[in-house]
Image (cartoon, rainbow, N blue to C red):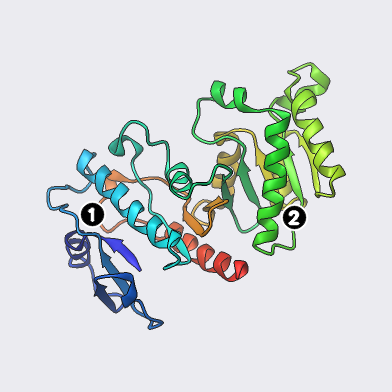
Amino acid sequence: MHTVDRHVFERNANRFAAGLNRRWIDDLSGITEEPVLFLHDAGGNSTGIEWGKLSREAGQRAIAYLEVAGAAALAGHIDAIVTAPVSKEAIGKGFVGQTDFLAERAGRTQYAMAFFAPTFKVVLATIHLSLREALAQISTEHYVKLIRFVDRQLQRFRFDGRRIAVAAINPHAGEGGMFGREDTDLLAPAVRQCAADGINVSGPHSADSLYYRAHSGEFDLVIAPYHDQGLIPIKLIAHGEATNVTLGLPYVRTSPDHGTAFSIAGKGEADPSGMEAALKCAVDLVRRGK
């Protein structure tokens, strides 16, 4: 099912060759098992929104689509949500991302942003914060809870490989305290505690080589301390193949591994591989979770 304003869809669809068979539905009871793209009209007025231009109106419609999809998933009408990129600037102050938005609507206080690539996975210990704020949030207690949570989520989706590696914060994992004590004083105790509980976790490992080691098959999942440390390697290694996954929601939520692209909006030049990967990942996780 595709949640969209009818005008937006028709304007876009009329520019390109016919693709999937599609059918408009008034409510979710109209969804069947037929191989048809069901279109659910979100009922908004988006006629004034221009391609490729940042606007408050476009941001409001993006939130409206999220509200409709999130409510449908919470009600059990759908098993998964695959979100397209949104502009945080267009949506406005107070919106830090779709991950946090959907978690808040679902009433979940423990959740995590993850990226699943073909060879390994990354979970972020902190998300959209300045580096200073992210480091201030890191503690042994935070990491103990996160490692346990991540292991439970891997079990939830029946992944056989649950070798978790914790990435260090400082160069060379602090080099025994020479380059900072966060790895020794905060991360290492969390790893030891969780390993003693039977979780397959190790670290903190020096981040400069860890992601290649995971990509080569030594680890299944890396916990990164902050946003860019975790996402730069996974987007270099698997750009267009990695999928953003929100762990901890009562339903599956995925998204492509890229942001908006205002410069090519409406030109028919977008690479669909990221959205294709997100759709396939959502289907796989739904099947695994049943």
- Within the image, what quadrant is residue 193 found in? top right
Image point (42%, 44%), residue name: 101
Write the residue at 22% across / 66% down.
Answer: 13
Q: Separation of disc 1 and disc 2 at Cα? A: 42 Å
10 Å crowding of disc 1: few (<14), some (14-19), many (20+): some
Disc 1 + disc 2, Cβ < 8 Å: no
Q: Is residue 190 left or right of residue 240?
A: right
Viewer-closest of 64 and 221: 64
Q: Quadrant of the C terminus?
A: bottom right
**Left or right, residue 58 beside residue 220:** left
Secondary structure found at label 2: loop
Q: What number is the disc on residue 245?
A: none
Above or below for 56 versus 4: above
39 vs 91: above or below: below
Residue 108: percent from the left, percent from the top?
A: 53, 46
32 vs 29, nearest the viewer: 29
Residue highlighted by disc 1: 266
Figure check: 151 above or below 251? above
Q: Is residue 233 above or below residue 161?
A: above
| Amino acid beneath label 1 | Gly
Q: Number of marks in the image?
A: 2
For disc 2, the neighbor class at 10 Å (few under 14, some 14 to 19, many from 20) is: some
* Amino acid carrying mark 2 in the image: Arg
| Residue 132, image x, y percentages | 56, 21
Percent coordinates x, y for residue 174 in the rendering: 76, 23
**Which quadrant is home to the N terminus?**
bottom left
Mark 1 or 2: the one toward you: 2
Q: Can residue 55 be seen at all in this image of the molecule?
A: no
Q: Which residue is mark 2?
A: 162
Q: Secondary structure at mark 1?
A: loop
Which x, y percent locates residue 230? Answer: 60, 39
